[in-house]
Image (spheres, helix red, strand yellow):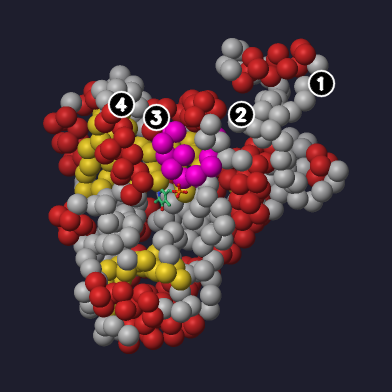
Amino acid sequence: MPMPIPTADGAAMAMYPETMMMGHGYRPEWSEGSLKPPVFQSSTFVFSSAAEGKAFFEVAYGHRGRAPGEAVGLIYSRLNNPNVEILEERIRVWDRAERAAAFESGMAAISTTLMTLLRPGDIVLHSQPLYGGTDHLIRKVLPDFGIEGVGFDVQATADEIEAIADQLGRDRVAMIYVETPANPTNALCDISACASVAARLSVRRRVPVVVDNTYLGPLWQRPLEHGADIVLYSATKYIGGHSDVIAGIALGDAELLDPIRAMRTFYGSVAGPFTAWLLLRSLETMKVRMDAQALGARQVADFLRDHPKVARISYLGHLEPGDQGFDTYKRQCLGAGAMLSVWLDADEAGAFRFLDALQTIHLAVSLGSTESLAQHPATMTHCDVPIDERDHMGVTEGLVRLSIGIEHPDDLIVDLGRALDAI
Ligand SMILES: *Cc1c(COP(=O)(O)O)cnc(C)c1O
């Protein structure tokens, strides 16, 4: 859908997000006519007068609101930086968010968000399973701060989630935290169901629904349109897309994002100028990359589904009416993504023979980038998950997770066929 953006003369102009990725939020006249923003590799910025410095600090520290038309002045790169500001203005277009905040990693975005919004005595209800780093933060770190995490099955209904809240004490639930699709099973969580529960729990305070959208966003899932309040990204994945930068993004409305942005200053978790510059470069090609990845993933998934050495494959594009998750998929997702979970007809040794035989596809964790990657969840990303939970999720010895890149799918299929023969 074209997005209305204000132009210099104040008129609104409708454009598609991919068009806006070329220049939105930046003007060449700011930088000697340079078509691309330079890297503002500066730690600090000069005030034109002492009064201006005073005014900038008053606004930055929240001592007074901004006057109409008053810009946020540049002070020091832990507070703000031109590359970071251009990135935040540009990236919020995809999720149509009011505010964005860029971080030096996905985990920095997640931890700063949780530490800003949660207080001792609070409970965060979260879908299960979660990304390993997030799981560790909630299970091992937050309890020392008096914050408890309680999981619900990723496919739970609104009634089931609300029943957990009733059991724990409705007033204690301060956040619903969601990851969908789940890693590595691709099971889907219904964001609108979580939003309906959060709305009913928001009596004494706003209970936000926070969605880690790394797996399908920003192209194939827009959680804010389904009632989520905050969207988080590991921008290391599809957004960065070249396996050359670690970064994170938080998006949402001003009421929630402004405190997160303020806390970022004190945790020092803001993205650096070069990180922001790399992401600006990456955003220009993000849509074509993700489109190509999705096309390739479908071909690879179809090949694997029919292969005798493959017991089962989980790929969103294969969901059919009647399947668990199909209705949520149709309502919530705009594409099937490029992540495949493949259960080989093999034990750990067989799975390792498969992984070691791959030549074009690299054996590495991470996902969403131009090159295809394969990994073994049971011994790699999910080795920390207790064995009974791993069994429950279907993280078996024979499971491998693939992230499909932008290589020609035929080359990937040749590589996978050869590796399957090696089992
Ligand atoms: C990678 C990842 C993260 C963590 O992001 P980093 O950039 O590595 O800090 C969080 N959530 C999901 C779903 C991820 O895939």
Q: Amino acid at mark 3?
A: Met
Identify the image quadrant of residue 374.
bottom left
Are circles 4 and 3 on residues that touch, CB within 8 Å? yes
Q: Which of the two labelled residues, at mark 2 and mark 4, occupies the earlier sequence position?
A: 2
Classed neighbour count for the residue bearing mark 2: other residues with Cα under 10 Å, few (<14), some (14–19), many (≥20): many
Q: CA distance from mark 2 to mark 4?
A: 26 Å
Q: Which residues are magenta?
A: 95-113
Q: Which of the two labelled residues, at mark 2 and mark 1, occupies the earlier sequence position?
A: 1
Q: Secondary structure at mark 1?
A: loop
Q: Secondary structure at mark 3?
A: helix
Classed neighbour count for the residue bearing mark 4: other residues with Cα under 10 Å, few (<14), some (14–19), many (≥20): few
Which residue is the site of mark 1? 48
Q: Please state the horizontal and vertical placement of residue 422, each as a whole percent of the image.
A: 32, 85
Mark 3 close to ligand 1, CB under 8 Å: no
Res 192 seen here: no
Which residue is the site of mark 4? 145
Rendered view: 238 above or below 198: below
Q: Report the side of 304 relative to 263 (left or right).
A: left
Identify the image quadrant of residue 8.
top right
Q: Secondary structure at mark 2?
A: loop
Q: Please state the horizontal and vertical placement of residue 323, each as a whole percent of the image.
A: 24, 64
Give the numbered dot on residue 115: 3
